[in-house]
Amino acid sequence: MQPLWQEHAFDRVRADRIYRWRLRAQRFLDDVLLFFRFSTFSLHLSTMWKGRFQQETSSLVQRYGESISYDWRLYPHDIVGSMAQAEALCRAKIITKTEMTAIHKGLKEIKAEIDAGKFEWKMELEDVHMNIESALTKRIGPAGAKLHTARSRNDQIALDTRLYCRAETQEIIGLVKGLQEALVQCGLKNQSVIMPGYTHLQRGQPVLFAHHMLAYVEMLGRDAARLTDALKRINIMPLGSGALAGSTICLDREFVAQRLGFDAVTHNSMDAVSDRDYIAELLFAIALCGTHLSRLSEDIILWVSAEFGFVTLSDAHTTGSSLMPQKKNPDVAELTRGKTGRLFGNLISLLTTLKGLPLTYNRDMQEDKEPLFDSVDTIKLALAVFAEMIVGMKVNADRVRAAAGDPFLLATDLADWLVLKGVPFRHAHEIIGKLTAHSLATGTAFPDIPLEQYKAFSPVFDASVFKVLTLEQAVAARKAIGAPSPANVARELTAWQPRLAAAPRRKGK
Ligand code: ARG
């Protein structure tokens, strides 16, 4: 019998030969395709910016510089922006009403084609702007060629990106609220469950499980507020800034802003075409929201472990192991924790792109889009899947309660009891520290230590000390604003509901 390793070596040689042949055939086909593409498409490109060029753009440069493979998704914004531009040109009598109508009609048809997946994007036309403008001119003739009057792709991309950020930010805010609502519902369902609160991942003091949920509702509330605030700076209209210095053909920018639902127009053309602050802000708000989701992920990952067993996730939101049949893994939480790194990377990527750029537009700025799209897509999915997962999460009340039954959780309450009897806190802290050492050494929990023994640590102790040694009493006593008494938590759960009422309903709910 031929040794296995020899058989393997023979296969590899043969596979290499086949691979080399396929590569050669592929290259030949590519060349043929490129030849045909060039002869057709260079025609369109020549109408865009090829006037002063005598050589065709290298195909490698085209591949290197194209953004159509990802910026195509700006098309609804590019089209609505171009419709407003046509209206402004008509108002300034640069084009006739008939031409404007033709532009509107053409753009609507192109949008319908793209919506239906029938539009052919051409890499040779570089980006979404030139693809759409070229298709429009092809469709309606000379009127299409007038659309770009007093406009540059520099203010056009600034407009498209702002419109995109506005729409997406509004959606993200809705999704944040959807998750908050799921967390509030989870709190309501488990309102009486007392759990250990942790610092340093060591059991600290008793809290309500709902209080823990509400902590995330607060974080997400700040995320929504940050996004809402970012909208103020996103929703400013840059069109009319031209390449960098406006245009000698003055269009009514305030009219355009009003037509596109912007709150104001930008006031410096150079800043307007260079500004990507609003993207950085959005990426930061998303990264921080990701951080919050990642912390919640970490809690959930701990809680579903056999060691904690505090919660059980639904089968629909967990995955199995291909090797270990017993496994039920919290992949959604792990993925969210992992993807948060990408959200940070996207923010850093944009800041790095911008930091060395002289005014005004530089092509480096094209690199803003992929991080932006990636962060927006990632956070939207993460928020949606988290909301679903929290709705399906079961809290194992007895396991949580058992962990909260750890008598040491009440050590601070004992110290507080002494303080209320007039013992200075530092002194009380020391007394209870010693009592804890005694409890550990003798294996006797606080409630089981006889009163006489208590008195040996401090003569202040009397029988009423045993009253503080119940969990119910311990949480009920924490009633200052923001503390986890059941009354406070119930009030917070109620207060959040109307604030979240405007949240869009999640599918299937
Ligand atoms: N695709 C370009 C971008 O995303 C559009 C603006 C191009 N402007 C230019 N001068 N080449 O930044």
Image (cartoon, rainbow, N blue to C red):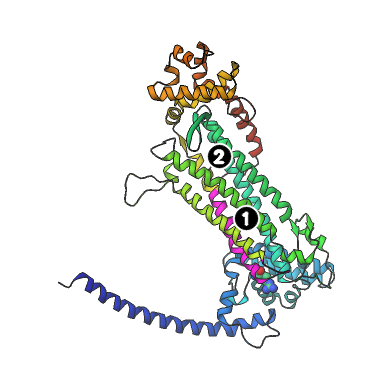
Give residue 375's position: percent from left, percent from top. 58, 56
First along the sequence among labels 1 and 2 = 2
Q: Quadrant of the C terminus?
A: top right
Q: Mark 1 is on which residue type?
A: Leu
Ligand 1 picture quarter:
bottom right
| Along the line of sight, the residue nearer the viewer: 287 or 263 | 287
Indicate the quadrant where residue 480 lies. top right
Amino acid type, mark 2: Ala
Which residue in the protein does label 2 denote? 182
**Gap in Å between the C-alphas at discs 1 and 2?**
24 Å
State left or right for residue 451 relative to residue 225: left
Determine the residue positioned at 50% across, 23% down: 432
> Which numbered tag is attached to residue 292?
none
Residues shaded magenta: 356-382
Q: Measured along the vertical axis of the image, is residue 34 above or below residue 265?
A: below
Label 1 neighbourhood size at 10 Å, few (<14), some (14-19), many (20+)?
many
Q: Residue furthest bottom?
A: 54
Residue depicted at x 64% and y 69%: 364
Residue holding disc 1: 283
Determine the image quadrant of residue 356: bottom right
| Closer to the camera in the image, 108 or 176 | 176
Image-based side of 318 in relation to 468, left or right? left
Residue contact between numbered discs 1 and 2, judged by CB atoms under 8 Å: no
